[in-house]
Amino acid sequence: MRRYLTILGLFLSFSLLGQEADSLTLNFREYLGYVKKYHPIAKQAELVIAIGEANLMKARGGFDPKVEVDYDRKKFKGTEYYDRLNATFKIPTWYGIELKGNFEQTDGEFLNPDETLPDDGLYSAGVSFSLGKGFLANDRMATVRKAKFFREQTLADRDLLINTILFDACVAYFDWLQAYNDREIYRRFLDNAQIRFEGIRKRARAGDLAAIDTVEAKIAYQNRALGLTQAEVTLRNKTLALSNFLWMPNNIPVELREEVIPDTTLEGEIDLALEIMGLPLDSFTIENHPKIISLGRKIDQLTIDKRLKTNNLLPQIDLEYNFLTETPELINSLQQENYKGGVNISLPLFLRKERGELKLAKFKLRDAEFEYANASISIANKVLAIYNELESFEEQNQLVYDIVTNYRTLLRGEERKFNFGESSLFLINSRESKLIDARLKQNELQNKFFKAKAKLFQSLAINPESL
């Protein structure tokens, strides 16, 4: 269940651009700042980076030194069959090489001959490594390299997630602004219709106008009231939609109160808040786009995986060599004639598993490369289309402004003619309806213009640092 907080408590740190009798202005930039800081999805985006760091830590754990102790003893009816102790310290290194120190001690009456050791035990120090499979590419190396690329990928994915939630928040704010402006238009014209109705009714009572004119004036007033009622409902719904993006610390959702209004003069604020001001088309570089960076790091990971699968086609050749000594404290006790070594060679005859895994790795890499190429051209064309759209909207905004001005001039002229008895109430209502439609169209066009700026922000995948 959502908690209802007073707007004053929510926006103590907000800049109140306007403070009329009973209203507070929700600043666009501060609003986006709260979305980026407190919205759950924005917090999830930060978790993506933490996941990348944890994944890298996990991968590096494959190179952690390891201590192994194996102790085995058997005693039955007073006879000690065997007592074996084997302690090993291993240090994995990059190219499949493993450094190893070992201590063995055995005792008992039924030991195998090869297990007979000096009374104080036997020490060994050596190295094991792989030739062929596992030398230039192995699971530990591949995991760490992929984890590093994955960490870089999470940074780009974080920017994409934050950009997406901020874009959705912008759209909600612009819809809220349009609903508020539409409501204000209906409210002002309702006041005009009421004043006109009262004036016509007085003139009709005085015999200056026909009584039928009061009916037409009342119908106009009722139409404006109906429009205002519908606009109020739309505004309340858009306010609720905006509230979905408002959260306080500790994951407390917030709902706006009715006295909170949008900033109606935010056109210059949008470019600053979204950091798209001064970004000409020729400054756009596709290589720096977070989506392209993310796909690039994905390709890097798949390339490493393909190299690993290619290396797995080689035969498994494991070599091990250990110096043996009873006195490890003496360096010169490590003699070449005292050693323990071995070699292990294995190779599947058909390599069907390895060849199948390599083919799958190649297909995945090819798929990622296709996605990268498609995303590159799609993003570039989308950015170009939005720049064209913005240029068109600037021209459209000027045209609709002129249309509204002309309709307002016609309405005023018709009202003057009506006062001189040269026009009718029907023409006034017709002119006024055209003006209302033009004003609503102006609000709609402004909303589309603002959303086009938000789409540019989204297509560039900007993560604003100033919020």
Image (cartoon, rainbow, N blue to C red):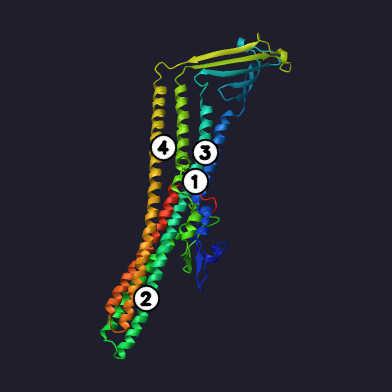
Q: Secondary structure at mark 4?
A: helix
Q: From this viewpoint, is residue 6 visible?
A: no
Quarter-of-image position of residue 71: top right
Q: Amino acid at mark 3?
A: Glu
**Left or right side of 418 for 68:** right
Q: Are marks 2 and 1 in contact (CB under 8 Å)?
A: no
**CA gap, disc 2 to disc 1?**
46 Å
Neighbour tally class for label 4: few under 14, some 14-19, many 20 plus, Cα within 10 Å: many
- Image location (x, y in percent) of residue 104: 65, 18
- Image location (x, y in percent) of residue 134: 51, 21
Please give the count of numbered marks on the rendered protein: 4
**Left or right side of 182 for 76:** right
Q: Which residue is mark 1?
A: 159
Q: Residue at x 53, y 27 (%)?
A: 141
Q: Which mark is residue 190?
A: 2
**CA gap, disc 2 to disc 3?**
57 Å
Residue 123 against residue 300 in the figure, above or below: above
Q: Which residue is mark 4?
A: 372
Q: Earlier in the sequence, mark 1 or mark 3?
A: 3
Q: Earlier in the sequence, mark 2 or mark 4?
A: 2
The one of 266 and 150 positioned closer to us in this rendering: 266
